[in-house]
Amino acid sequence: MEELAIEHKIISKSILATDGKIRIIKLELLAPIIAKNYLPGQFVILMVTQNGERIPLTIVDTDTTRGTITIIFQEIGYTTKLLGNLSPQQNIYHLLGPLGKPTEIKNFGKVIIIGGGVGAAEIYPVAKSLKSVGNKIITILGARTKNLVLLEPELRKVSDEVYVTTDDGSYGEKGVVTDVLKKLLTQNEQPNLVYAVGPIVMMRAVAEVTKPFGIQTIVSLNTIMVDGTGMCGSCRVTIEGKIKLVCCDGPEFDAHKVDWEELIKRNNIYISQEKEILEWYKL
Ligand code: FAD
Ligand code: FES
Ligand code: MG
């Protein structure tokens, strides 16, 4: 884990998607030691400013020659908006990683990979790695509307089939990712693995669809995190009745064993403070 007091400069920035209100931003950060030690499925915890909070973001790509890592995030609240307002050549205050257990990369056979919203960015490194070891990759991408569909060209390059759904029907099929998943499971030969990242309600819905078919289903959980090293307990989840810490035991877990109700409650703990700070700063 990199904990050195070196500068984490923003090398490049681009706005990947926006619907006029929400922006999804890609940043390339100078972080040579994290880039060198990273494995797919891992994440960083960063602080934008010295007095700010710590937030986890998935490492989407690395370039070991340039010594950079790429993160993609949705400006959802105070800290992600602060991060999104930085420009190339500016530094972020602190960066820790790579954190979490890496994804198991092996030849499962046929894998359905599902990304909802900004989860599309989080599935990209996993799809790329699973494809490189010979899996057949079927990708399902979901977004609220056409302008928020993320990384479709990149995911097409590493997938055998790609399906896109939008809530408003402005692109791809009108509906949600589980509509396509249900169709694929009833029509086709079944996959050996389903891997899903997105909003908690989407991951829970995926788990409900695959459970009756007995298909192994992995989700990457987005709990609230503070230290990212197992000390604060804020990322606690219950998996098959046992307490686990998402930052060290995860972030990936068997979707059929997650206590989803508890996870939803715990992720909403600070919702009134999160709204208050946005109103306070008129963001
Ligand atoms: P807030 O208004 O403070 O919070 C909005 C919502 O984000 C909250 O209701 C809560 O559900 C969640 N959240 C708030 N604080 C935290 C926190 N400290 N830790 C985790 N969740 C929090 N988002 C991306 O856009 N791209 C990613 O690649 C990505 N990867 C993630 C990987 C992991 C392992 C985890 C756990 C989360 C990831 N997230 C990712 C979610 C991201 O951390 C939150 O969107 C971010 O922390 C919100 O902060 P905020 O201050 O802007 O919003
Ligand atoms: Fe503190 Fe996991 S983030 S224990
Ligand atoms: Mg916040």
Image (tube, grey):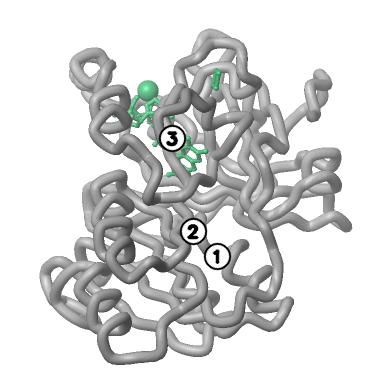
Q: Give how far apart the Cα atoms at labels 1 and 3 are.
A: 25 Å
- Labelled disc at residue 124: 1
SS class, disc 2: helix
Whether label 2 lies within 8 Å of ligand 1 gets the answer yes
Residue type, numbered disc 2: Ala
In the picture shown, does residue 183 fall above or below 26?
A: below
Seen from the viewer's position, the closer of residues 192 and 180 is 192
Q: Residues within 10 Å of mark 3 (few under 14, many from 20)?
A: some
Q: Nearer the viewer, mark 2 or mark 3?
A: 3
Q: Residue at x 40, y 29 (%)?
A: 241
Report helix, strand or loop for mark 1.
helix
User: Which residue is label 2 attached to?
Assistant: 121
Mark 3 = which residue? 239
Q: Residue at x 85, y 55 (%)?
A: 64
Quadrant for the C terminus in the image: top left
Side (left or right) of 143 relative to 120: left
Q: Quadrant of ligand 1?
A: top left
First reached walking from the N terminus: tag 2 or tag 3: 2
Q: Are marks 1 and 3 in contact (CB under 8 Å)?
A: no
